[in-house]
Image (cartoon, helix red, strand yellow):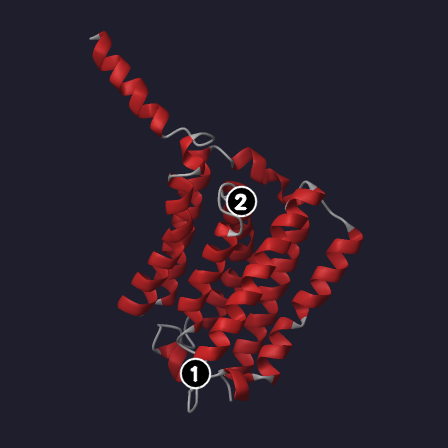
Amino acid sequence: MLETLGDIVAIARLFDWEDNMTTKWKSLLALLPTCLVVLGLHVFKNAVLTLLLYHVLIVATLGFSRKVSTCRGIWKGWSTPYGLNLIIVASSVGLLLYVLQPVILKDGLDFRQALLGLGLGDHNWLPFALYFSIVHPVLEEMFWRVCLDLERPVPLADDICFALYHVFVLSFFVRAYWLAIIFCMLVATSYVLKAVYKRCNGLLVPALSHATTDVSIAIAASMMRRV
């Protein structure tokens, strides 16, 4: 009986978040969003399903890692210099996307039809855009900034994984060489948001700037699908 209990304790220790999760399970979790995007978008062709699967992963991770209390810091950590500068930059992302779409988007791409091919039409575009702009950035910041921190032993590992899943999303719309440029920009963005989170000791600035980015992208996408 004691040996059995000992085995159970030993197995439980394998799932200790702050110990083995750092190098083993966190690495797997960092790659799962890419796997879910490939499954949801490239196999099932459904953007709503993909986003929901991703968010189920995030919520499950928050519960399993017992980081929910830490994530209450979403309302903490405001810094005017960091906050205003990041929000100003973030608000320009959608505008740049809209202005540069002839250069960035694939030749002959019908943006509206591309969205329809992923299950996003007039019937669900607005609720999807609102959910993407409000709920999604908050959950992402909790997942990537709080739950995952893979700076040790591999610098930028979590930032690279964050950028990687976006590439598989954007591959439906963006030219190949632009994917490489955007990938590098997203790695840098993730690194900056992580640094700001640690510097400000809270998620408020990263979450607001992330939400501002997503709002600007949703507005640009709404305009592009009407063209």
State left or right for residue 102 relative to residue 120: right
Quadrant of the drawing holding the N terminus? top left
Observer-nearest of 98 and 133: 98
Q: Which residue is mark 2?
A: 151
The amino acid marked with disc number 2 is Glu
**Residue appearing at x 55%, y 82% in the figure:** 223
The relative height of residue 187 versus residue 217 in the rendered view (above or below) is above
| Residue 23: image location, x then y, percent | 42, 38
Q: Quadrant of residue 215?
A: bottom right
Q: Residues within 10 Å of mark 1 (few under 14, many from 20)?
A: some
The amino acid marked with disc number 1 is Arg
Observer-nearest of 225 and 160: 160
Observer-nearest of 200 and 208: 200
State left or right for residue 53 relative to residue 138: left
**Residue appearing at x 79%, y 55% in the figure:** 81
Observer-nearest of 86 and 114: 86
